Image (tube, rainbow, N blue to C red):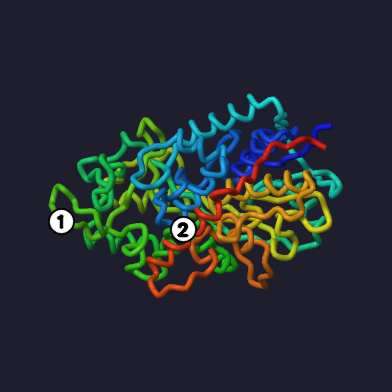
Amino acid sequence: MTAKIRVIGGGLSGCEAALQLADAGMDVELWEMRPTVTTPAHKTGNLAELVCSNSFKGLALTSAHGIFKEELRLMGSRLIALAMESRVPAGESLAIDRDLFSAAVEKAIASHPRITLRREEADSLDPRELTLVATGPLSSDKLTQSLFSLIGSERLYFFDSIAPVVELDSLDLDQAFAKNRWDKGTEPDFLNCPLDKETYFAFVEALVQADTVEAKPFEKGQLFEGCLPVEEMARRGPETLRYGPMRPIGLHDPRTDKRPFAVIQLRAENRQRTLYNLVGFQTRLKWGTQKQIFSLVPALKNAAYARFGAMHRNTFLNSPQVLEPSLRIKGTRIYCAGQLTGAEGYTEAIGTGMYAASMILAHERGEASFAWPEASCLGALTRHLTDPNPDFQPMNFNFGLLPKVETRSKKDKKGIQIENCLAALADFRPFPAFAGC
């Protein structure tokens, strides 16, 4: 008899897990409620739809996100491979065409003989049924209630925001220049919208005074620090944006041969480069206010918006209390993966889907001692998710999660951690063929 599993959620983690489990020989029933049941943030019913941004962040092996993606690539991640095939120019980062990527994932799922896709809402959980919950931070109310009834834990949440997307034809390109920071790469991948000193401070003041969609007092302490709304950053001080998403370092304007006082960078959303998003400009401003304030930027004066920024509430588990190191809910046959576990970020969602799939397969094979290497990125991330932590909060992967190394040099420390990670993975194979049960 072939083992069967129900995977709930057709996002990044659910699709990665479904493909890995099916490739290994399990029969997978993949449930996705969209488009029948929608969420506050998704725009389509497509599998693996990217919500907040089209960027998976850096690729350089010297960066945390770069070494993490390299680890997933080496271990055979299906979605990282599809993301690389759907790339749009973005310097040393992995940015993708959202539509091409979703279509590629849909094709991989639909063509797999061991995956059955069910386009309906899963509204209940049976602790005796082998299940992977990968519904992300925007799980349906019914499933969320079932989940939290099962674990007997209060739900946790934070507020996240989405950056606007503008149409290229609506921009004043005479007020912008194409350039990568420090001129890296063979061709410029970013459009840069410069601001002089006077315009910058007027822009910041407008952000500080602006109306927001949900200006509730309780939100302030529940914003995700890794994806703060631009207006919240502006309120932290007039220079904050100039040292954050609007930093001009490494961006000399070829028209003036000078560095602008501040810059808003635009990154391509699709391969045709007809749509661009405002890099680092997640916002909860009202739509009319967004258009009004961003029009203060000369290049964006008459910008047409394919999508305005928005804010949504992200629910996550108190993972250290309720999950085993395998990401299984204690006392059940239910595993969890993705942003629901507190692993914040696209690469992290794919990674935890991959991790959960490997742990499910190992358990079904009777390999209780199976574990990812301690020096690996996924091993470090899942330890953070499941080790005791009274102040647990969502987190992106970073070098601080990897095992400590003894060295005085920060640069040497990262280099050693990267070497240790790659060495630990040299003979590690998380997905041997599954023989059934």
Horizontal side of residue 340 vs 406, given as left or right: right
Query: Which quadrant of the figure contains the N terminus?
Result: top right
Q: Residue at x 63, y 62 (%)?
A: 383
Measured as percent of width and height from the top left, residue 300 is found at: 31, 45
Q: Residue at x 25, y 53 (%)?
A: 182
| Location of residue 172 (image quadrant) | top left
Q: Nearer the viewer, residue 92 or 242?
A: 92
Q: Residue at x 48, y 47 (%)?
A: 70
The kind of residue tagged 1 is Lys
Horizontal side of residue 23 vs 177, given as left or right: right
* Mark pair 1, 2: CA separation: 37 Å
> Which residue extends farthest bottom?
408
Query: Which quadrant of the figure contains the C terminus?
Result: top right
Contact check, label 1 and label 2, Cβ < 8 Å: no
Residue 258 got which mark?
1
- Residue tagged 2: 418
